[in-house]
Image: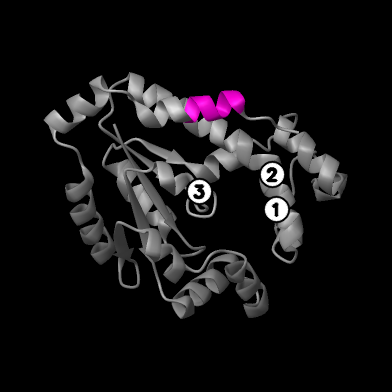
Amino acid sequence: MKLIGLTGGIASGKTAVSRMIIRRKLPLIDGDLLAREVVEPGKPAYNLIIKNFSRDVLNEDGTLDRAKLADIIFSDEQKRKILNRCTHPYIRRKIFKLLAWYWATGEKLVVLDAPLLIESGLYKWMSAVVVIYVSEQLQLHRLIKRDNIQEHAALQRISAQMPIREKIKYADHVIDNSSDLGETERQLNVVLAKVYPTWWNWLITWLGPPTIVVLGLAAVANSKIK
């Protein structure tokens, strides 16, 4: 089974590319979706967030006020690291459980959509890394328009992440999303044609040691979350 890592910067268009992949009926693990699931009320990560940030980051119904929490972490790197320690171990556990399932069911290729693929070190486990690229100027413009926020707030959020130009250094393939979605999809088709395993290659990797799954499950089993 080949595991393809998909990443990019905020407002780079990674979500649009993920939708294209899903339309092709390819298995996709959505890191953003998992991040929302692990902070649902009553979950361990949710409790850790309350412990570290107080109940001030909750809505009246007890759910996480994501906008308020975002304002806090994007203006304070230390608090951003604290939030990552609260959530990342649980997100990884969900990722590896899904990978084990996909390997057991004989999938040839799985895409992991993860905003922090490079920063978290997960890129090391990928068969290939695909980075969605846009210029910083276009990224800023799209973020302001998408989230309806001021320029200083948008710049703050962009600067909190690794620049896309730095992520490209880790990429095996780059998709330039600066133009229209039709052009982006054309580039995606080229990348998928390159990374999709042949039947023989899939059989060898499936029958051989499933390294990614074994290492992943071992990491999960041995991880300690405080």
Q: Amino acid at mark 3?
A: Gly
Residue 160 seen: yes
Image quadrant where residue 79 sits: bottom right
Residue name at image x 30 percent, y 56 percent: 172
User: Magenta stretch?
Assistant: 216-222
Q: Residues within 10 Å of mark 2 (few under 14, many from 20)?
A: some
Element carrying mark 2: helix
Relative placement, left or right, of 27 versus 86 is left
Predominant SS along the magenta part: helix
| Mark linked to residue 183 | none
Q: Is residue 58 above or below residue 200?
A: below
In the rendered image, which quarter contains the N terminus?
top left
- The residue type indicated by label 1 comes to Lys
Q: Which mark is residue 121?
A: 3
Q: Where does the C terminus fall, quadrant-wise? A: top right
Q: Which residue is mark 2?
A: 85
Q: What residue would you read off at disc 1? A: 81
Q: Is residue 22 left or right of residue 158?
A: left
Q: Nearer the viewer, mark 3 or mark 1?
A: 3
* Residue sitting nearer the eye, 226 or 12: 226
Image colouring: one colour
Who comes first in sequence, dot 3 or dot 1? Answer: 1
Quarter of the view holding residue 80: bottom right
Residue 152: x %, y % from top left: 66, 78
Q: Residues within 10 Å of mark 1 (few under 14, many from 20)?
A: few
Amino acid residing under circle 2: Arg
